Image (tube, rainbow, N blue to C red):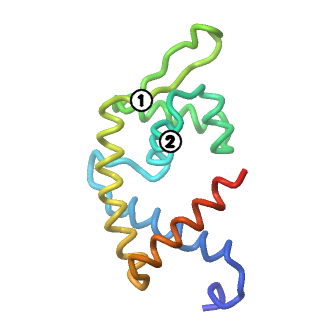
Amino acid sequence: MELMSNGRTLPLVSYLARSGWRALDTSAQPGDITHRQLLALTLLKERGDLAQQDITRVFGLDASNVVGLLNELEERGLVLRRRDEADRRRHIVALTGEGALMLERTFTRLASIEDELLHALTSQERETLHHLLLRVATSD
C-alpha cells in the first residue's frame, strides 16, 4: 500500500485514526456516544469546565456545529451548560457525573478497538507509540 511506503507519518496517523473512529462508530449500540461526542467529553474531563467558545476554538469547528454537538450531549445529560457569572453572554460547559460514566464505558470499548487496530505491536511498542504521540501532541 503506497500510504505506508511513502515515508510520511501524517497520512499513516490519519489513516489509523479514521480506522479507529470508524470502528468505534460502527460498534456503537443504542445509547453509546459517537467519536465526536467522545472528543468533547474527553476535552472537558481533561481541562475541566470550559467556555463554549473555547471548545469551538480547540476543535476548530464552526460555532453552530459545536452548539449542535453540545445540544446532543446536554439533552442526554452528559454535559451541563450554564451562564458565566462573570460574563452573562458566555456559556460554561461542564461534564456531568453521567458524562464521566459514559466516557469510562466508551474508553473500555475504545481499548478493545485499539487492541485490534494495534495487534501487530507488543505492549511495550504500544506504550512507546503512545508516549511519542503524546509528546508531539503536547509540545505547544
Residue 60 in picture, x, y percent from top left? 68, 44
Q: CA distance from mark 1 to mark 2?
A: 10 Å
Residue 77 in picture, x, y percent from top left? 34, 29
Q: Residue at x 31, y 43 (%)?
A: 102
Q: Is residue 76 left or right of residue 135?
A: left
Q: Secondary structure at mark 1?
A: strand
| In this view, 74 is above or below 62 | above
Residue 47 in picture, x, y percent from top left? 53, 36
| In this view, 22 is above or below 28 | below
Looking at the picture, tell me which residue is in the foreground, 83 or 128.
Answer: 128
Q: Is residue 107 left or right of residue 81?
A: left
Pick the quarter of the image with the N terminus: bottom right
Q: Is residue 63 left or right of residue 103?
A: right
Looking at the picture, tell me which residue is in the foreground, 138 or 111.
Answer: 138
Q: Tell me the number on the disc at residue 40.
A: 2
Residue, disc 1: 79
Q: Residue at x 51, y 72 (%)?
A: 128
